[in-house]
Image (cartoon, coloured by chain):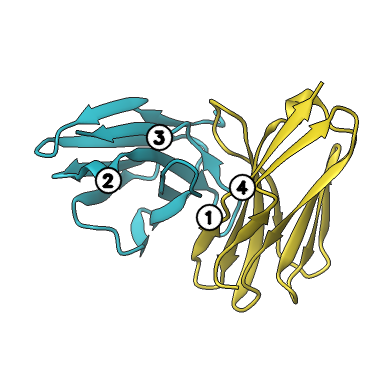
Amino acid sequence: ILNVEQSPQSLHVQEGDSTNFTCSFPSSNFYALHWYRWETAKSPEALFVMTLNGDEKKKGRISATLNTKEGYSYLYIKGSQPEDSATYLCASLNRDDKIIFGKGTRLHILP
Amino acid sequence: DTEVTQTPKHLVMGMTNKKSLKCEQHMGHRAMYWYKQKAKKPPELMFVYSYEKLSINESVPSRFSPECPNSSLLNLHLHALQPEDSALYLCASSRAQRNEQFFGPGTRLTVL
């Protein structure tokens, strides 16, 4: 994988349900994986920065895992709320400080 | 102050105009970034400044000229742009390169 791929592109989830989505990135020359949340009409906001294989990070109802050997990260949202509606971007940073963003997963929470 | 500010919010310019985008942060961050984002595409890194020195230039055409006058300010000077340069231009900063980035709200640029 040379690019950063995110799936699905778009997701509709019922309020209260849990969900997850994926970020795939180049595993060679890897340094860090960033997750950002981008709400409409706002600036992207950092969620997590992960560097080590097996890293798990948590912020409230949102958590993320990292597998650097196979080049993927999962973002989990437990008990989705309307305020979770946003585009979730991941970005892969390599050891040459090159950063590549994925296209994002657009999450819609249905009331 | 934990904000990155960008001015202007919107800019419409002709292909012969010269204009500048401005980005400011007062968090003491030493790395600052310019990204270009077109609709339905991910943000694309253009430039990175680290400690006020240009660290990365992602082969950006010379009609885009970055400038970092001090550690709080980052400018992007625009000259002889093309209509395909129309996009959202995002500025970000981080404590150092490789740290989490704090983004501004962006400048929506339209080139006629």
Residue A54 screen position, x and y as percent: 83, 67
Q: CA distance from mark 2 to mark 3?
A: 26 Å
Mark number for residue B84? 2
Chain letter for the cyan part = B
The chain to which mark 4 is attached is A
Vertical position of residue B87 compared to residue B105: above or below? below
Residue at the image point whose x is 43% and y is 34% from the top: B106
Vertical position of residue A67 compared to residue B65: above or below? below
- Which mark is nearer the camera, 4 or 1? 4
Seen from the viewer's position, the closer of residues B1 and A106 is A106
Q: CA distance from mark 4 to mark 2?
A: 22 Å
Instruction: Evaluate whether label 4 is on the same chain as label 2.
Output: no
- Which mark is nearer the camera, 4 or 3? 4
Residue at the image point whose x is 62% and y is 60% from the top: A5
The chain to which mark 2 is attached is B
Residue A62 screen position, x and y as percent: 82, 42
Q: Residues within 10 Å of mark 2 (few under 14, many from 20)?
A: few
Direction left: furthest residue = B16
Q: Residues within 10 Å of mark 3 (few under 14, many from 20)?
A: many
- At label 1, which amino acid type do we have? Ala
Mark number for residue B96? 1
Residue beneath disc 3? B24
Mark number for residue B59? none
- At label 2, which amino acid type do we have? Glu
Residue beneath disc 4? A104
